[in-house]
Structures are given as structure tokens and as C-alpha cells.
Amino acid sequence: MKKVLSSLAIIAILASCSKEVSSVETIKVNNVKKTTSVQCIGTTQAGARCKNMTLSSNSKCYLHGGN
């Protein structure tokens, strides 16, 4: 249960981070690589930042041209 909470905490921290992330981050835990999703760097038509999460290497969700 502790591993699940720590993974969720990391995702929450990454999602709340205001800086743009240029690539998907990989975290190595107990010699197992885990890829975390990051918030899309795209913007909505209203000008707000997209709230979708993505695993895409260009940090964009499927709506904004992710891989």
C-alpha cells in the first residue's frame, strides 16, 4: 500500500507543478522503471492550460498532437 501511495503522491506533485515539463519522466524504483504521466503542455481555446495527463514523449495529450 505504501508504494501505491508514494506513486500517487509523485503524480499529484507533478500535476500541480507549474513549470512545463519537456519530456516524460522515468522513475526507477527497486530496479523497475516506472513512467509517470505529466500534464499536457497544450492550451485550450480559452487560453488555459490543458488538464489532460499524458505519457507522450513530447508532453502533449492526444488532442494537442501527442505521439
Image (cartoon, rainbow, N blue to C red):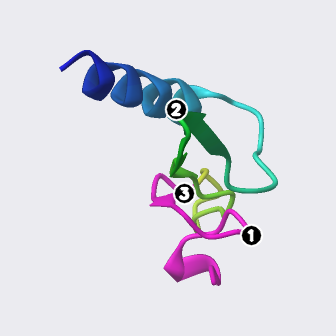
Q: Which residue is mark 1?
A: 58
Q: Which mark is residue 29?
A: 2
Q: Residue at x 57, y 32 (%)?
A: 14
Q: Is residue 32 magenta?
A: no
Instruction: Report whether 52 appears left or right of 64.
Output: left
The residue sitting at 50% across, 31% down in the picture is 30
State the extent of the magenta-drawn residues as a range: 50-67
Residue found 39% across the figure and 30% down from its top:
7
Q: Amino acid at mark 2?
A: Val
Residue located farthest toward the left when viewing the structure as drawn: 1
Residue identified by numbered label 3:
50
Q: Earlier in the sequence, mark 2 or mark 1?
A: 2
60 sits left or right of 62 in the view: right
Front residue (pair 35, 37) = 35
Crowd band around label 2 with a 10 angstrom C-alpha radius: few (<14), some (14–19), many (20+): few
Res 28 → quadrant: top right
Dividing the picture into quadrants, the one containing residue 23 is bottom right
Q: Which mark is residue 35?
A: none
C-alpha span from label 1 to label 3: 14 Å
Residue 52 percent coordinates (x, y) = 45, 58
What quarter of the picture does the C terminus occupy?
bottom right
User: Given the image, on which type of amino acid does mark 3 rest?
Assistant: Cys
Kind of residue indicated by mark 1: Asn
| Residue 53 on the magenta span | yes
Query: Which quarter of the image is occupied by the N terminus?
Result: top left
Indicate left or right for 58 with 44 as reference.
right
Indicate which disc, 1 or 3, sits on the residue closer to the N terminus. 3
Q: Residues within 10 Å of mark 1 (few under 14, many from 20)?
A: some
- Image location of residue 55, percent across then percent down: 54, 63
Q: Does residue 9 appear to the left or right of 21 in the view shown?
A: left
Question: Which of the 4 image quarters holds residue 20?
Answer: top right
